[in-house]
Image: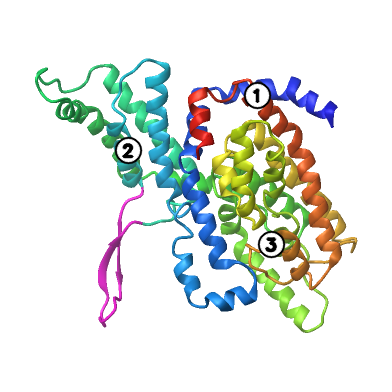
Amino acid sequence: MDHITKFVEEKIAPPLIKFSQYRYIQVIQRTGLGIMSLLIIGSIFTLLSAFPVPAYQNFIGGFKTTLASAAGVGTAFIALYTVITTSYALVEWYNKNKGEKTDIIQPMILAVASYLLINPVQTVNTLVKGSKTPVPFAGLPITYMGAIGVFSAIMVGILSVEMYRFFIRRHWTIKLPENVPPMVSSSFSALIPASCVIIIWWLFRFVLNLDLPKLISDIFQPLVVVGDTPWAVLVATFLNRILWSVGIHGGNIVSGVAGTFWTQMFTANQTAFQAGKALPYTFTSVLMDNYIWTGVFPLAVVLLTCKSQRLKKMGWLALPAAIFNIGEPLIFGLPIMLNPLMMIPFILSSFIVAIVAVIMVPLHWLPIPVLTIPWITPAPIKAFLSTNGSWAAVAFVVVGWLFSMAVFYPFVKAMDNAELKGELLDDDTDKVATTK
Protein backbone atom coordinates (compact mmCIF):
# COMPACT_ATOMS: atom_id res chain seq x y z
CA MET A 1 0.00 0.00 0.00
CA ASP A 2 2.90 2.38 0.78
CA HIS A 3 4.33 1.81 -2.71
CA ILE A 4 0.99 2.61 -4.31
CA THR A 5 0.61 5.72 -2.17
CA LYS A 6 4.12 6.85 -3.12
CA PHE A 7 3.40 6.25 -6.82
CA VAL A 8 0.19 8.27 -6.65
CA GLU A 9 1.88 11.10 -4.73
CA GLU A 10 4.89 11.29 -7.06
CA LYS A 11 3.48 10.43 -10.48
CA ILE A 12 -0.27 10.96 -10.50
CA ALA A 13 -0.99 13.59 -7.87
CA PRO A 14 1.35 16.45 -9.01
CA PRO A 15 -0.26 17.07 -12.44
CA LEU A 16 -3.73 16.61 -10.97
CA ILE A 17 -2.97 19.01 -8.12
CA LYS A 18 -1.64 21.51 -10.64
CA PHE A 19 -4.85 21.12 -12.59
CA SER A 20 -6.87 21.65 -9.42
CA GLN A 21 -5.15 25.01 -8.94
CA TYR A 22 -6.59 26.43 -12.14
CA ARG A 23 -8.99 29.30 -11.72
CA TYR A 24 -12.25 27.62 -12.68
CA ILE A 25 -11.45 24.42 -10.81
CA GLN A 26 -10.85 26.42 -7.63
CA VAL A 27 -14.12 28.23 -8.23
CA ILE A 28 -16.01 24.97 -8.65
CA GLN A 29 -14.50 23.56 -5.46
CA ARG A 30 -15.54 26.71 -3.63
CA THR A 31 -19.01 26.23 -5.08
CA GLY A 32 -19.35 22.82 -3.42
CA LEU A 33 -18.43 24.24 -0.03
CA GLY A 34 -21.04 26.96 -0.39
CA ILE A 35 -23.94 24.51 -0.52
CA MET A 36 -22.56 21.92 1.88
CA SER A 37 -24.71 22.93 4.85
CA LEU A 38 -27.96 22.58 2.88
CA LEU A 39 -26.94 19.15 1.61
CA ILE A 40 -26.33 17.94 5.15
CA ILE A 41 -29.63 19.39 6.41
CA GLY A 42 -31.51 17.75 3.55
CA SER A 43 -29.78 14.44 4.26
CA ILE A 44 -30.87 14.56 7.90
CA PHE A 45 -34.50 15.10 6.93
CA THR A 46 -34.24 12.28 4.39
CA LEU A 47 -33.00 9.92 7.08
CA LEU A 48 -35.72 11.00 9.51
CA SER A 49 -38.47 10.49 6.94
CA ALA A 50 -37.30 7.21 5.39
CA PHE A 51 -35.34 5.39 8.09
CA PRO A 52 -35.85 1.73 7.02
CA VAL A 53 -37.18 0.29 10.27
CA PRO A 54 -40.87 -0.78 10.20
CA ALA A 55 -41.43 0.05 13.89
CA TYR A 56 -40.09 3.54 13.35
CA GLN A 57 -42.16 4.02 10.20
CA ASN A 58 -45.30 2.92 12.05
CA PHE A 59 -44.43 5.33 14.86
CA ILE A 60 -44.13 8.43 12.64
CA GLY A 61 -47.07 7.40 10.43
CA GLY A 62 -48.37 10.26 8.31
CA PHE A 63 -45.78 12.64 9.77
CA LYS A 64 -43.34 11.02 7.33
CA THR A 65 -44.68 13.30 4.59
CA THR A 66 -44.12 16.34 6.78
CA LEU A 67 -40.52 15.32 7.43
CA ALA A 68 -39.93 14.54 3.75
CA SER A 69 -41.05 18.05 2.77
CA ALA A 70 -37.63 19.39 3.81
CA ALA A 71 -35.61 16.45 2.47
CA GLY A 72 -34.92 18.19 -0.83
CA VAL A 73 -33.88 21.51 0.65
CA GLY A 74 -30.33 20.93 -0.55
CA THR A 75 -30.82 18.90 -3.72
CA ALA A 76 -34.16 19.94 -5.25
CA PHE A 77 -32.77 23.34 -6.32
CA ILE A 78 -29.06 22.61 -6.16
CA ALA A 79 -28.53 23.90 -9.71
CA LEU A 80 -29.98 27.28 -8.75
CA TYR A 81 -27.77 27.40 -5.65
CA THR A 82 -24.83 26.46 -7.86
CA VAL A 83 -25.38 29.45 -10.15
CA ILE A 84 -25.26 31.70 -7.10
CA THR A 85 -22.19 30.16 -5.50
CA THR A 86 -20.28 29.79 -8.80
CA SER A 87 -20.78 33.42 -9.82
CA TYR A 88 -19.97 34.60 -6.30
CA ALA A 89 -16.81 32.47 -6.13
CA LEU A 90 -15.55 33.63 -9.53
CA VAL A 91 -15.95 37.33 -8.75
CA GLU A 92 -14.36 36.68 -5.37
CA TRP A 93 -11.42 34.95 -7.11
CA TYR A 94 -10.80 37.88 -9.44
CA ASN A 95 -11.06 40.40 -6.60
CA LYS A 96 -8.65 38.41 -4.46
CA ASN A 97 -6.11 37.21 -7.05
CA LYS A 98 -6.26 39.93 -9.71
CA GLY A 99 -6.82 42.93 -7.50
CA GLU A 100 -10.19 43.75 -9.07
CA LYS A 101 -12.88 45.55 -7.12
CA THR A 102 -16.00 44.23 -8.83
CA ASP A 103 -19.21 44.44 -6.83
CA ILE A 104 -20.27 40.83 -6.17
CA ILE A 105 -24.03 41.40 -5.96
CA GLN A 106 -24.57 42.63 -9.54
CA PRO A 107 -22.93 39.74 -11.45
CA MET A 108 -24.36 37.19 -9.01
CA ILE A 109 -27.93 38.39 -9.57
CA LEU A 110 -27.21 38.59 -13.30
CA ALA A 111 -26.09 34.94 -13.37
CA VAL A 112 -29.26 33.80 -11.59
CA ALA A 113 -31.41 35.82 -13.99
CA SER A 114 -29.55 34.29 -16.94
CA TYR A 115 -30.12 30.74 -15.70
CA LEU A 116 -33.82 31.40 -15.16
CA LEU A 117 -33.96 32.95 -18.63
CA ILE A 118 -32.73 29.75 -20.29
CA ASN A 119 -35.18 27.74 -18.15
CA PRO A 120 -38.26 29.85 -18.91
CA VAL A 121 -41.61 29.78 -17.13
CA GLN A 122 -44.15 27.52 -18.81
CA THR A 123 -47.93 27.82 -18.87
CA VAL A 124 -50.22 24.79 -18.80
CA ASN A 125 -53.94 24.24 -18.41
CA THR A 126 -54.76 22.33 -15.26
CA LEU A 127 -57.59 21.67 -12.82
CA VAL A 128 -57.40 23.47 -9.49
CA LYS A 129 -59.25 22.57 -6.33
CA GLY A 130 -62.87 23.68 -6.45
CA SER A 131 -62.92 24.11 -10.24
CA LYS A 132 -64.40 21.85 -12.91
CA THR A 133 -62.71 23.41 -15.91
CA PRO A 134 -58.98 23.69 -16.59
CA VAL A 135 -57.42 27.09 -16.01
CA PRO A 136 -54.01 28.42 -17.12
CA PHE A 137 -51.22 27.92 -14.62
CA ALA A 138 -47.73 29.37 -15.03
CA GLY A 139 -44.78 27.82 -13.26
CA LEU A 140 -41.04 27.32 -13.37
CA PRO A 141 -40.07 23.84 -14.64
CA ILE A 142 -37.80 22.16 -12.11
CA THR A 143 -36.27 19.56 -14.43
CA TYR A 144 -32.93 21.34 -14.50
CA MET A 145 -33.12 22.98 -11.10
CA GLY A 146 -31.86 19.85 -9.33
CA ALA A 147 -28.65 17.83 -9.67
CA ILE A 148 -29.22 17.13 -13.37
CA GLY A 149 -28.73 20.84 -14.06
CA VAL A 150 -25.61 21.45 -11.96
CA PHE A 151 -23.13 21.34 -14.83
CA SER A 152 -25.14 23.73 -16.98
CA ALA A 153 -25.55 25.97 -13.91
CA ILE A 154 -21.76 26.09 -13.49
CA MET A 155 -21.37 27.03 -17.15
CA VAL A 156 -23.97 29.79 -16.93
CA GLY A 157 -22.46 31.14 -13.72
CA ILE A 158 -18.95 31.31 -15.18
CA LEU A 159 -19.94 32.60 -18.61
CA SER A 160 -22.24 35.27 -17.20
CA VAL A 161 -19.50 36.64 -14.96
CA GLU A 162 -16.89 36.53 -17.72
CA MET A 163 -19.18 38.32 -20.16
CA TYR A 164 -20.01 40.89 -17.49
CA ARG A 165 -16.29 41.47 -16.82
CA PHE A 166 -15.64 41.76 -20.57
CA PHE A 167 -17.84 44.85 -20.77
CA ILE A 168 -16.78 46.27 -17.39
CA ARG A 169 -13.06 46.06 -18.23
CA ARG A 170 -13.67 47.98 -21.47
CA HIS A 171 -15.57 50.64 -19.51
CA TRP A 172 -18.76 50.13 -21.51
CA THR A 173 -20.73 51.51 -18.62
CA ILE A 174 -22.81 54.49 -17.57
CA LYS A 175 -20.68 56.88 -15.54
CA LEU A 176 -22.38 59.10 -12.97
CA PRO A 177 -20.90 62.08 -11.10
CA GLU A 178 -18.66 61.28 -8.14
CA ASN A 179 -21.12 62.75 -5.62
CA VAL A 180 -23.71 60.04 -6.48
CA PRO A 181 -24.01 57.39 -3.69
CA PRO A 182 -21.91 54.27 -4.49
CA MET A 183 -24.92 51.90 -4.45
CA VAL A 184 -26.76 54.03 -7.01
CA SER A 185 -23.66 54.47 -9.14
CA SER A 186 -22.97 50.71 -9.05
CA SER A 187 -26.48 49.91 -10.25
CA PHE A 188 -26.26 52.27 -13.20
CA SER A 189 -22.72 51.21 -14.14
CA ALA A 190 -23.96 47.62 -14.38
CA LEU A 191 -26.88 48.50 -16.65
CA ILE A 192 -25.11 48.23 -20.01
CA PRO A 193 -23.00 45.12 -19.20
CA ALA A 194 -26.01 43.36 -17.66
CA SER A 195 -28.20 44.22 -20.66
CA CYS A 196 -25.60 42.79 -23.04
CA VAL A 197 -25.32 39.56 -21.07
CA ILE A 198 -29.09 39.09 -20.94
CA ILE A 199 -29.38 39.78 -24.68
CA ILE A 200 -26.72 37.16 -25.42
CA TRP A 201 -28.50 34.49 -23.36
CA TRP A 202 -31.83 35.55 -24.90
CA LEU A 203 -30.41 35.11 -28.41
CA PHE A 204 -28.97 31.75 -27.40
CA ARG A 205 -32.20 30.40 -25.89
CA PHE A 206 -35.06 31.99 -27.84
CA VAL A 207 -33.67 33.14 -31.17
CA LEU A 208 -31.35 30.19 -31.83
CA ASN A 209 -33.67 27.95 -29.76
CA LEU A 210 -30.78 26.17 -28.03
CA ASP A 211 -31.69 24.56 -24.72
CA LEU A 212 -28.34 24.30 -22.91
CA PRO A 213 -29.40 22.00 -20.04
CA LYS A 214 -31.17 19.65 -22.44
CA LEU A 215 -28.25 19.70 -24.87
CA ILE A 216 -25.91 18.49 -22.15
CA SER A 217 -28.27 15.67 -21.23
CA ASP A 218 -28.87 14.66 -24.85
CA ILE A 219 -25.15 14.36 -25.54
CA PHE A 220 -24.95 11.33 -23.29
CA GLN A 221 -28.30 9.64 -23.92
CA PRO A 222 -27.43 7.97 -27.26
CA LEU A 223 -24.32 6.48 -25.64
CA VAL A 224 -26.27 4.26 -23.27
CA VAL A 225 -26.61 0.67 -24.44
CA VAL A 226 -29.71 -0.93 -23.01
CA GLY A 227 -30.06 -4.68 -22.75
CA ASP A 228 -29.70 -7.73 -20.59
CA THR A 229 -25.94 -8.02 -21.12
CA PRO A 230 -22.82 -7.43 -19.04
CA TRP A 231 -21.82 -4.72 -21.51
CA ALA A 232 -24.95 -2.75 -20.70
CA VAL A 233 -24.08 -2.87 -17.00
CA LEU A 234 -20.50 -1.76 -17.62
CA VAL A 235 -21.51 1.06 -19.95
CA ALA A 236 -24.20 2.24 -17.53
CA THR A 237 -21.72 2.10 -14.62
CA PHE A 238 -19.04 4.01 -16.47
CA LEU A 239 -21.43 6.70 -17.73
CA ASN A 240 -23.07 7.03 -14.33
CA ARG A 241 -19.74 7.69 -12.61
CA ILE A 242 -18.40 9.92 -15.38
CA LEU A 243 -21.54 12.05 -15.30
CA TRP A 244 -21.56 12.36 -11.50
CA SER A 245 -17.88 13.32 -11.72
CA VAL A 246 -18.76 16.41 -13.76
CA GLY A 247 -21.76 17.36 -11.65
CA ILE A 248 -24.52 15.80 -13.75
CA HIS A 249 -26.95 13.42 -12.06
CA GLY A 250 -25.70 10.19 -13.62
CA GLY A 251 -28.56 8.12 -12.27
CA ASN A 252 -31.18 10.38 -13.82
CA ILE A 253 -29.48 10.53 -17.21
CA VAL A 254 -28.82 6.80 -17.53
CA SER A 255 -32.15 5.67 -16.12
CA GLY A 256 -33.92 8.29 -18.22
CA VAL A 257 -32.95 6.31 -21.30
CA ALA A 258 -32.85 2.77 -19.95
CA GLY A 259 -35.46 3.08 -17.22
CA THR A 260 -38.38 1.82 -19.30
CA PHE A 261 -36.52 -1.34 -20.27
CA TRP A 262 -35.15 -1.92 -16.79
CA THR A 263 -38.63 -1.56 -15.30
CA GLN A 264 -39.99 -4.21 -17.62
CA MET A 265 -37.05 -6.49 -16.82
CA PHE A 266 -37.20 -6.38 -13.03
CA THR A 267 -41.00 -6.53 -13.07
CA ALA A 268 -40.81 -9.72 -15.11
CA ASN A 269 -38.21 -11.08 -12.69
CA GLN A 270 -40.41 -10.34 -9.67
CA THR A 271 -43.39 -12.00 -11.33
CA ALA A 272 -41.34 -15.09 -12.09
CA PHE A 273 -39.89 -15.10 -8.58
CA GLN A 274 -43.35 -14.99 -7.00
CA ALA A 275 -44.47 -17.86 -9.27
CA GLY A 276 -41.41 -19.93 -8.40
CA LYS A 277 -40.13 -19.87 -11.99
CA ALA A 278 -36.67 -19.19 -13.41
CA LEU A 279 -35.78 -15.51 -13.69
CA PRO A 280 -35.95 -14.34 -17.32
CA TYR A 281 -33.39 -11.53 -16.90
CA THR A 282 -30.05 -11.19 -15.14
CA PHE A 283 -28.50 -7.76 -15.66
CA THR A 284 -31.27 -5.50 -14.43
CA SER A 285 -31.14 -2.17 -12.61
CA VAL A 286 -31.85 -4.07 -9.38
CA LEU A 287 -28.52 -5.88 -9.79
CA MET A 288 -26.73 -2.54 -10.17
CA ASP A 289 -28.59 -1.00 -7.23
CA ASN A 290 -27.50 -3.77 -4.89
CA TYR A 291 -24.05 -4.82 -6.08
CA ILE A 292 -22.58 -1.67 -7.65
CA TRP A 293 -24.34 1.44 -6.32
CA THR A 294 -23.39 0.77 -2.72
CA GLY A 295 -22.69 4.40 -1.82
CA VAL A 296 -19.63 6.43 -0.87
CA PHE A 297 -19.42 5.02 2.64
CA PRO A 298 -15.88 3.69 1.97
CA LEU A 299 -14.68 7.19 1.04
CA ALA A 300 -16.22 8.69 4.19
CA VAL A 301 -14.39 6.10 6.30
CA VAL A 302 -11.06 6.78 4.59
CA LEU A 303 -11.46 10.52 5.18
CA LEU A 304 -11.53 9.82 8.92
CA THR A 305 -7.87 8.79 8.68
CA CYS A 306 -6.80 12.20 7.34
CA LYS A 307 -4.66 14.63 9.28
CA SER A 308 -6.22 17.61 7.52
CA GLN A 309 -8.97 18.95 9.74
CA ARG A 310 -11.12 19.87 6.74
CA LEU A 311 -11.00 16.38 5.29
CA LYS A 312 -11.46 14.62 8.62
CA LYS A 313 -14.45 16.79 9.55
CA MET A 314 -15.85 16.25 6.07
CA GLY A 315 -15.65 12.52 6.70
CA TRP A 316 -17.48 12.77 10.03
CA LEU A 317 -20.15 15.06 8.55
CA ALA A 318 -20.77 12.82 5.55
CA LEU A 319 -20.55 9.47 7.35
CA PRO A 320 -24.14 9.28 8.73
CA ALA A 321 -25.62 10.12 5.32
CA ALA A 322 -23.18 7.84 3.47
CA ILE A 323 -24.28 4.83 5.53
CA PHE A 324 -27.74 5.33 4.06
CA ASN A 325 -26.49 5.75 0.45
CA ILE A 326 -26.69 9.56 0.39
CA GLY A 327 -23.59 10.70 -1.46
CA GLU A 328 -24.29 14.35 -2.33
CA PRO A 329 -22.38 15.80 0.65
CA LEU A 330 -19.16 14.22 -0.65
CA ILE A 331 -19.90 14.53 -4.37
CA PHE A 332 -20.59 18.26 -4.16
CA GLY A 333 -18.96 19.14 -0.84
CA LEU A 334 -15.56 17.38 -0.81
CA PRO A 335 -15.87 17.60 -3.81
CA ILE A 336 -15.65 14.54 -6.03
CA MET A 337 -17.22 16.56 -8.84
CA LEU A 338 -14.53 17.94 -11.17
CA ASN A 339 -11.87 17.01 -8.62
CA PRO A 340 -9.41 14.97 -10.72
CA LEU A 341 -7.79 13.43 -7.66
CA MET A 342 -11.14 12.00 -6.51
CA MET A 343 -12.70 11.32 -9.90
CA ILE A 344 -10.20 8.54 -10.67
CA PRO A 345 -10.89 6.30 -7.64
CA PHE A 346 -14.60 7.20 -7.74
CA ILE A 347 -14.91 5.85 -11.29
CA LEU A 348 -12.35 3.07 -10.96
CA SER A 349 -13.70 1.46 -7.77
CA SER A 350 -17.28 1.21 -9.09
CA PHE A 351 -16.19 -0.01 -12.49
CA ILE A 352 -14.02 -2.84 -11.10
CA VAL A 353 -16.79 -3.89 -8.70
CA ALA A 354 -19.15 -3.96 -11.70
CA ILE A 355 -16.75 -6.20 -13.66
CA VAL A 356 -16.54 -8.65 -10.76
CA ALA A 357 -20.33 -8.63 -10.31
CA VAL A 358 -21.10 -9.38 -13.98
CA ILE A 359 -18.66 -12.30 -13.82
CA MET A 360 -19.85 -13.81 -10.54
CA VAL A 361 -23.61 -13.59 -11.16
CA PRO A 362 -23.69 -15.71 -14.37
CA LEU A 363 -21.43 -18.25 -12.64
CA HIS A 364 -24.06 -18.46 -9.88
CA TRP A 365 -21.53 -17.43 -7.26
CA LEU A 366 -23.87 -14.54 -6.52
CA PRO A 367 -27.67 -14.64 -6.64
CA ILE A 368 -29.61 -12.32 -8.91
CA PRO A 369 -31.18 -9.52 -6.84
CA VAL A 370 -34.92 -9.50 -7.43
CA LEU A 371 -36.79 -7.52 -4.80
CA THR A 372 -36.80 -3.74 -4.93
CA ILE A 373 -35.76 -2.32 -1.56
CA PRO A 374 -35.85 1.40 -0.63
CA TRP A 375 -32.62 2.98 -1.84
CA ILE A 376 -31.92 4.55 1.55
CA THR A 377 -31.47 1.13 3.18
CA PRO A 378 -27.80 0.49 4.10
CA ALA A 379 -26.16 -1.43 1.27
CA PRO A 380 -25.44 -4.78 3.01
CA ILE A 381 -28.98 -4.94 4.42
CA LYS A 382 -30.45 -3.92 1.07
CA ALA A 383 -28.51 -6.68 -0.74
CA PHE A 384 -29.61 -9.24 1.88
CA LEU A 385 -33.29 -8.33 1.47
CA SER A 386 -33.20 -7.97 -2.31
CA THR A 387 -31.79 -11.48 -2.72
CA ASN A 388 -34.31 -12.89 -0.24
CA GLY A 389 -31.71 -13.50 2.45
CA SER A 390 -28.41 -14.29 0.71
CA TRP A 391 -25.34 -13.93 2.92
CA ALA A 392 -23.18 -14.21 -0.19
CA ALA A 393 -24.71 -10.94 -1.38
CA VAL A 394 -23.92 -9.32 1.98
CA ALA A 395 -20.33 -10.58 1.83
CA PHE A 396 -19.93 -9.21 -1.71
CA VAL A 397 -21.06 -5.73 -0.66
CA VAL A 398 -18.79 -5.71 2.41
CA VAL A 399 -15.78 -6.93 0.41
CA GLY A 400 -16.63 -4.35 -2.26
CA TRP A 401 -16.55 -1.66 0.42
CA LEU A 402 -13.16 -2.85 1.64
CA PHE A 403 -11.84 -2.88 -1.92
CA SER A 404 -13.15 0.64 -2.52
CA MET A 405 -11.44 1.84 0.66
CA ALA A 406 -8.17 0.44 -0.67
CA VAL A 407 -8.68 2.22 -4.01
CA PHE A 408 -9.58 5.55 -2.39
CA TYR A 409 -6.84 5.42 0.26
CA PRO A 410 -3.75 6.47 -1.76
CA PHE A 411 -5.65 9.28 -3.49
CA VAL A 412 -7.12 10.58 -0.25
CA LYS A 413 -3.68 10.33 1.35
CA ALA A 414 -2.19 12.36 -1.51
CA MET A 415 -4.90 15.01 -1.15
CA ASP A 416 -4.44 15.01 2.62
CA ASN A 417 -0.70 15.63 2.31
CA ALA A 418 -1.26 18.31 -0.32
CA GLU A 419 -3.75 20.14 1.87
CA LEU A 420 -1.40 19.99 4.82
CA LYS A 421 1.25 21.62 2.63
CA GLY A 422 -1.23 24.26 1.49
CA GLU A 423 -1.17 23.13 -2.14
CA LEU A 424 -4.92 22.76 -2.63
CA LEU A 425 -6.49 25.39 -0.39
CA ASP A 426 -5.16 28.68 0.89
CA ASP A 427 -5.57 29.53 4.54
CA ASP A 428 -8.78 31.55 4.10
CA THR A 429 -10.56 28.87 2.13
CA ASP A 430 -9.48 26.23 4.62
CA LYS A 431 -10.94 28.24 7.47
CA VAL A 432 -14.22 28.51 5.61
CA ALA A 433 -14.23 24.79 4.82
CA THR A 434 -13.54 23.66 8.36
CA THR A 435 -16.37 25.72 9.79
CA LYS A 436 -18.97 24.08 7.60
Of residues 395 and 290, the one nearer the viewer is 395
Of residues 163 and 81, the one nearer the viewer is 81
The image shows residue 351 at horizontal and vertical percentages of 75, 46
Q: Residue at x 53, y 57 (%)?
A: 44
In this rendering, position of residue 210 left or right of residue 434 = left
* Image: 361 above or below 344: below
The tally of labels here is: 3
The image shows residue 394 at horizontal and vertical percentages of 81, 61
> Dot 3 surroundings within 10 Å: few (below 14), some, or many (20 or more)?
many
Q: Which residue is mark 3?
A: 285
Label drawn at residue 418: 1
In this rendering, position of residue 415 left or right of residue 62 = right
Does the image show residue 28?
no
Contact between labelled residues 3 and 2, with CB atoms less than 8 Å apart: no
* Image: 136 above or below 40: below
Mark 1 or mark 2: name the one nearer the start of the chain.
Answer: 2
Amino acid beneath label 2: Trp
Residue 226: which quarter of the image? bottom right
Q: What is the distance, in whole Å, between disc 1 and disc 2 at their CAs?
A: 39 Å
* Image: 92 above or below 236: above
User: Mark 2 falls on what kind of element?
Assistant: helix
Q: Which residues are magenta?
A: 119-140
Q: Is residue 102 magenta?
A: no
Label drawn at residue 201: 2
